Image (cartoon, helix red, strand yellow):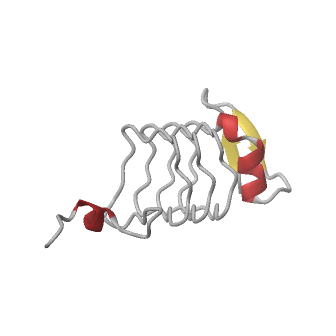
Amino acid sequence: MTRIYNIDGELMFEDIDLSLIQLVEKNKDYLCLADLAGSDLKGADLYDASLIRANLRGANLKGADLRGAHLQEANLDDANLSGADLYRANLRGATFSNSTIFPNGKSLQKLLRKEGE
């Protein structure tokens, strides 16, 4: 059962007949605190989306347009961001894990590894 709540905890949508990507794209201004863990958002248009403190753990965001997205304090542990466009996205305070795949296809561990190691 799909339920989407607003930032005040009020139920906005329940069991609607839209794909998850359509639902997210149509409501991208209201996704603060959204629980989208494990969601398949491959190629989603999340330009300038408000995803502050959203749970995107394990989400597939491959090829998603996240330009200008507000991802402050979002949980991106184990998320797939390969091919995603994060130009001017705000990731301040966001969390990542060693399994998070970044746009260049590298893991956090590989990004932090010093040259020559």
Side (left or right) of 20 relative to 53: right
Please provide percent x and percent y for residue 111. Answer: 29, 62
Q: Is residue 56 above or below residue 108?
A: above
In the image, 7: left or right of 17? left
Query: Considering depth in this image, is 77 or 66 the residue closer to the camera?
Result: 66
Determine whether, in the image, residue 116 is placed left or right of residue 22. left
User: Furthest-right residue in view?
Assistant: 17
**41 and 104: which is toward the camera:** 104
Q: Residue at x 61, y 26 (%)?
A: 8
* Residue 80, above or below 2: below
Give the image location of residue 79, x and y in percent.
47, 62
The reply, left or right, for residue 98 in relation to residue 44 is: left
- Residue at the spot x=60%, y=36% of the render? 50
Residue 6 percent location from the top left of the image: 65, 33
Quarter residue 102 falls in = bottom left
Residue 110's place in the image compared with 37, above or below, is below
Q: Quadrant of residue 51?
A: top right
Front residue (pair 31, 93): 93
- Measured from the top left, where is residue 89 in percent x and y? 51, 42
Q: Quadrant of the N terminus?
A: bottom right
Which image quadrant: the C terminus? Answer: bottom left
Most distant residue in the front direction = 116
Q: Quadrant of residue 29?
A: top right
What residue do we see at 47% from left, 62% from top? 103
